[in-house]
Image (cartoon, helix red, strand yellow):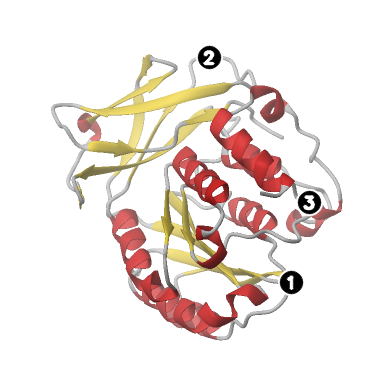
Amino acid sequence: MGPKLQRLFALVLAGLPMIFAETPYQSGPIWRSIKGNQGPKVEVIRSSTNLVDIFVTVKEGNRFVNGLTLDSFEVYEDGVAQRVAFFEAEDSPVSVAILLDTSASMQKAIGILQTAAVKFVEGLTDKDEATVISFGGMIKELSPLTRNKERLSSVIRQTYAEGDTLLYDAITRAIFKLEGASGRRAIVLITDGADTASQLSVESVVRVSGRMAVPLFIVGEGDALKEVQLRKSLEALAARTGGQAFFLKEAQQLPRAFSEISANLKASYRTGYYLRTPIDGKWHKISVTLKGSKGKVITRQGYYAKAKY
């Protein structure tokens, strides 16, 4: 296992607070290439409102639970009950960043990947919007956030496999892309799991994902199954954000994974609360429970309370 994977595994599972408290990436060439000439300006908890966003999915066995209301949930921060400020039902629009690994190692799977991704796009509602970002030798934003399914499908079909794998850079790019999107948000990532050329560190990915309310759904195939520690790390990263990780024995299983993710998005809720404590830069644990139900709640595990970084 390489040094990058070792660091990612240790950070995601252990959640070392000292590392997450650092913000050495406020400037630099990679940020200018992603966010423009001024570097990143991120409102993790909106400073004007001190709002904590939470996306929630509930399952009973293999079935997603629909029809829940604001009164169905109890929300806690660090064990203290919070007053829920708003609630959006599962039929509200969602903004999705579709991240496609188009590195050379995906050559054999690219056709199946395209077909599965197009089917996923076709399953979006008319109110949903999506962007397509590919990462091979370069990170390419193939489409802005749009409701135009034909455009999204077209750019997906035009992808081809070449170059290295900029996995960590691409995840971070997608998170910032969704920063300004309102309502429910999600990232759907398909990769063979082996990062080979990112400029951003794995620590940066974990920090950013710990501060942004964007569930990360990871579909791994190929080399992603061969490295046990990598698999555990990706699973932990997805769980930390309230998403899910899928690991496939063969590319032919991609459509099924996309179908599961689509069902998850259709059944997710958005809620949140206003902070009653100072923004202290520390990790705060979030827990959501159901009133009078035995369903399993899936949501982000917490957040770093930092208004800007």
Q: Position of residue 253 (x, y in %)?
A: 37, 71
**Which structural element holds mark 3?**
helix
Three-letter residue code for mark 2: Thr
Q: Earlier in the sequence, mark 2 or mark 1?
A: 1
**Which structural element holds mark 2?**
loop
Left/right placement of residue 102 relative to residue 200 reads: left
Measured Cα–Cα span from mark 2 to mark 1: 44 Å
Q: Position of residue 84 (x, y in %)?
A: 34, 27
Q: Which residue matches tag 1?
A: 137
Which residue does the image show at 44% across and 17% down from the upper left? 78
Q: Which residue matches tag 2?
A: 277
| Image: 6 above or below 290 | below
Q: How many marks?
A: 3
Q: Residues within 10 Å of mark 3 (few under 14, many from 20)?
A: many
Q: Which mark is residue 40?
A: none
Three-letter residue code for mark 1: Gly
| Image: 36 above or below 145 | above
Left/right placement of residue 186 relative to residue 10 reads: left
Q: Position of residue 2 (x, y in %)?
A: 71, 49
Image quarter where the C terminus lies is: top right
Q: Which mark is residue 31?
A: 3
